[in-house]
Image (cartoon, rainbow, N blue to C red):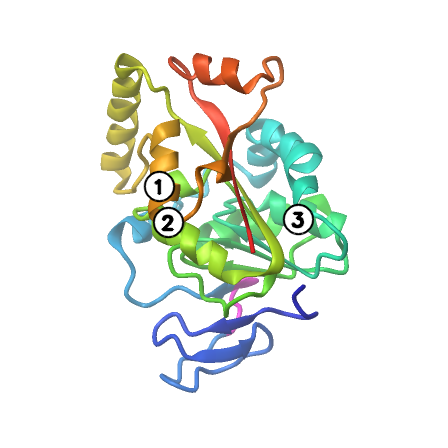
Amino acid sequence: MATDGPARFRCPDCAKAVGPLADAPACPGCGRVFAPAGGVWDLLPHALDATKVNEDRAHQDEGLPTWRRLFFHKLYGIEWCENKWLPQLREGRTRRVLEIGGGLCYAGALAKARAPHAWVAATDISPRYLRQHAVRVGSILGSPADAYAAADAEALPFEDEQFDAVYSQVVIYRLPDPVRALREIHRVLAPGGRYLGIERASPWLPPFTGREIREMGARSEAAGTGERPITYRGWREILARAGFPSTSLQVEPGGRVRSPSLRRLGNAVRPIYVAIRLAR
């Protein structure tokens, strides 16, 4: 398993190793200095894809207060994350945990509560959203992550083989290059480490897939982001291109319908949750 203490990170601009994510280190290659601002580390490259910049710009207006976002809009996700998904990642002593694309980052806070001696990093592409909401969520739940960091899931700014547990929830489908993101996630897993990604599989019957294409396409075009539907078959193709077996993808049981085959049948007309599991 990974060693104790903060994860070692690399410069997102020149890829030079910088050191532990602590204090105010400077990159030995390009001289960039890193320090948290508003409780959030900026580990994004200066040159960032437009769709990722727009993910941050979408949060210029704070909108709903943090507590309403958390308890009125995310309660279902919190309950499933705490009782069903996070327990799958813990085995023995978990020393480092990474949450990817967390948004409110309640998973990072819940992970810290479950493993208080672990070093937990909660990340998202939007530094603005992390400052406005994720840091507050950690305080509300009483177990803030050790580090909040703006990071690109397709180019994780961490050294190899460091995290015993990596978690993401309905994030990868929004990325321009899911294949690259999955390879990056596998790269940062420590020996014996595990990744669990909960994703959304869009309906596979053409009329219903077409509706999602139109609805997600309209939202993406308006916001300049990369949201798009991915079917169960699409997820299998993504995993194959990333070099992972089809067994890495499973249908998640529902609250009422637990049978994978029945869930897949119902997926003809409605979205379902699927789990991506990787291990090192």
The x and y percentages for residue 178 are 36, 46
- Whichever of labels 3 and 2 marks the residue nearer the N terminus, that label is 3
Which residue lies under the disc numbered 3? 109
Residue 101 highlighted magenta (yes or no): no
Which residue lies under the disc numbered 2? 242
The x and y percentages for residue 88 are 67, 41
Q: Which of 95 and 227 is in front in this view?
A: 95
Image: magenta residue range:
35-40
The disc labelled 3 sits on which kind of residue? Ala
Task: Determine the CA span between mark 3 and mark 2.
Answer: 29 Å
Where disc 3 sits, the SS reads helix
Is 122 on the left or on the right of 225, as rendered?
Answer: right
Residue drawn at the location 68% of the way across and 48% of the way down: 111
Which residue lies under the disc numbered 1? 238
The disc labelled 1 sits on which kind of residue? Ile
Residue drawn at the location 44% of the way across and 13% of the way down: 265
Residue 153 makes an appearance in the image: no
Of badges 3 and 2, nearer the viewer stands: 2
Residue drawn at the location 51% of the way across and 55% of the way down: 123
Of badges 1 and 3, nearer the viewer stands: 1
Task: Determine the CA span between mark 1 and mark 3.
Answer: 29 Å
